[in-house]
Image (cartoon, rainbow, N blue to C red):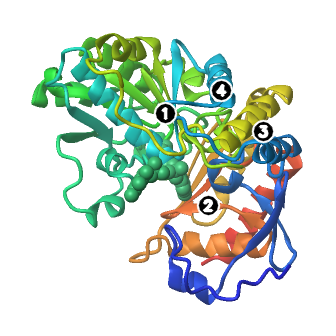
Amino acid sequence: MSTTPATLENFWMPFTPNRAFKAKPKLLVSAKDMHYTDSDGRQILDATSGLWCVNAGHGRAKITEAIQKQAAVMDFAPTFNMAHPLAFEFAHKLAGILPGDLKKVFYTNSGSESADTALKIALAYQRNRGHASKTRLIGRERAYHGVGFGGISVGGIVRNRMYFGSLLTGVDHLPHTHDPKLNAFSKGIPEHGADLADNLERLVALHDASTIAAVIVEPVAGSTGVLVPPKGYLQRLRALCDKHDILLIFDEVITGFGRLGAAFGADYFGVTPDIICMAKGITNAAVPMGAVAVSNRIYDTFMQTADVPIELFHGYTYSGHPLACAAGIATLEVYEEEALFKRANEIAPYWQEAMHSLRDAPHVIDIRNLGLIGGIELESRPGATTARALEVFDRCFDKGLLIRVTGDIIAMSPPLILEKAHIDQMVETIRAALKETT
Ligand code: PXG
Ligand code: PLP
């Protein structure tokens, strides 16, 4: 099979400089465990789990076989008004690892759909329990909640918002938690900034709690460059949401499924939200899938107050797709059999020291880490934000390492199966690339 496409002209690539890519394409053609193989046959060490999603490493036989088997048995079954057994089995298995009483699972196909689903459930919940004036949604600066209209409205990335009109109305934002003046080069959780959560009090004073349905945050902001919440921040946000009867949504699309060395960020931080968004690692990315977990209290409210037979007017053709459920069940088995969340937790201290060993490398102005996430912030070239990091990205790729860059920040999130030698290779490759970069 040829690995060179006949033409590059028809595929409009997502979040990509299409013209630059098509002038110099990078093509990945196969993957196994920690590595991709590119179209030149080179091995590329994957420091990003694809896009923060292949948590158990690539090409896991158990997952592949489960998908193959299910495809042969039943390709598709609707979940509107009927269903298939795997959709229930997988939800039950997920409930087994979900925190607190978040035991009811609604299926989506992506993180974007999970974010929009969570926001819609929050609004309908408030209305159903007789608080119809609670319609405002609070997001945060520098947040990423995917690319649906709900997600970009509560999100905090200017380019993801500015081209797309007036977005959702009735949205406000908390400030982001990144404070390099006080917290640069923090190892793990930064010391300063829990009081940033008190901005929720300010928003309550401005809008009144009777108009606010929910607050949505990523436990650790991934896409905008690994922003780890300050010590006590999430606890304080939880307390303020309780005080003002506001739902707390954790978008765990990245932090779920072992990324922080626990099943969910909620477990890692010891803070239980009312709703959790999932995607990515839920199927080890082998079949697209997302899900939203809600508390029994939220689900029961829908069941008890519905005035028509359907309790929630929402759903996707592919909610609970059989191939995705088969992949998800097998994925959870791999995580469990190999104790991968624990493994991530055990190797995290080595990861932390390795990341921070780059402190004296050229251009580095901050390093951040938590679990198996690492962020290395570079000084931007004057008037050319992102240029330096993009060069480092290209150099690393040429040297056989896949990293991710966002702005001038290198973001890493390796598969949880990685060995210390892989970490060493990542650090040395990045160091060499930084040295070659002006
Ligand atoms: N919420 C969060 C917290 C995410 O990180 C989404 C929602 C959207 O998921 P989907 O499956 O619709 O893409 C995400 C996705 C990056 C990068 O470069 C991050 C994501 C996706 C693509 C790239 O950091 N996060
Ligand atoms: N657009 C049209 C015309 C449709 O018929 C449907 C579903 O039936 C959709 C969009 C929604 O598609 P999905 O359920 O895959 O999100």
Report whether the residue tagged 2 is closer than 8 Å to ligand 1.
Answer: yes
Comparing 94 with 378, the one in front is 94
Q: Residue 85 placed where, x, y %?
A: 68, 27
Three-letter code, disc 2: Arg
Q: Label 4 is placed on what type of residue?
A: Ala
Say whether residue 269 is left or right of residue 334: left
User: Is tag 1's residue or tag 4's residue first in the polypeptide sequence?
Assistant: 1
The crowd level at tag 1 (other Cα within 10 Å; few <14, some 14-19, many 20+) is many
| Residue pictured at 59% horizontal, 31% vertical | 83
Secondary structure under tag 1 reads: loop
Residue at (49% x, 67% y) in the render: 15
Q: What is the distance, in whole Å, between disc 1 and disc 2 at their CAs? A: 20 Å
The residue under label 4 is 263
Question: Is 421 displayed left or right of 100 in the figure?
Answer: right
Q: Nearer the viewer, residue 132 or 273?
A: 132
Tell me which label, 3 or 1, sits earlier in the chain: 1
Q: Is residue 365 visible?
A: no
Residue at the image position 71 percent from the left and 44 percent from the top: 284
Foreground of the two, 290 or 34? 290
Question: Disc 3 or 2, which lies upstream in sequence?
Answer: 3
Q: Secondary structure at mark 2?
A: strand
Residue 194 picture quarter:
top left
Task: Tell me the CA gap for discs 4 and 3.
Answer: 20 Å
Q: From the viewer's perspective, is 420 left or right of 245?
A: right
Q: Residue furthest front?
A: 82
Q: CA distance from mark 3 to mark 2?
A: 20 Å
Q: Of the residues tagged 3 and 1, which is closer to the observer?
A: 1
Which of the marked residues, 4 or 2, is nearer the chain's N terminus?
4
- Which residue carries the number 2 mark? 404
The percent coordinates of residue 339 (x first, y second) are 81, 27
Q: CA distance from mark 4 to mark 2?
A: 23 Å
- The residue indicated by pointer 1 is 219
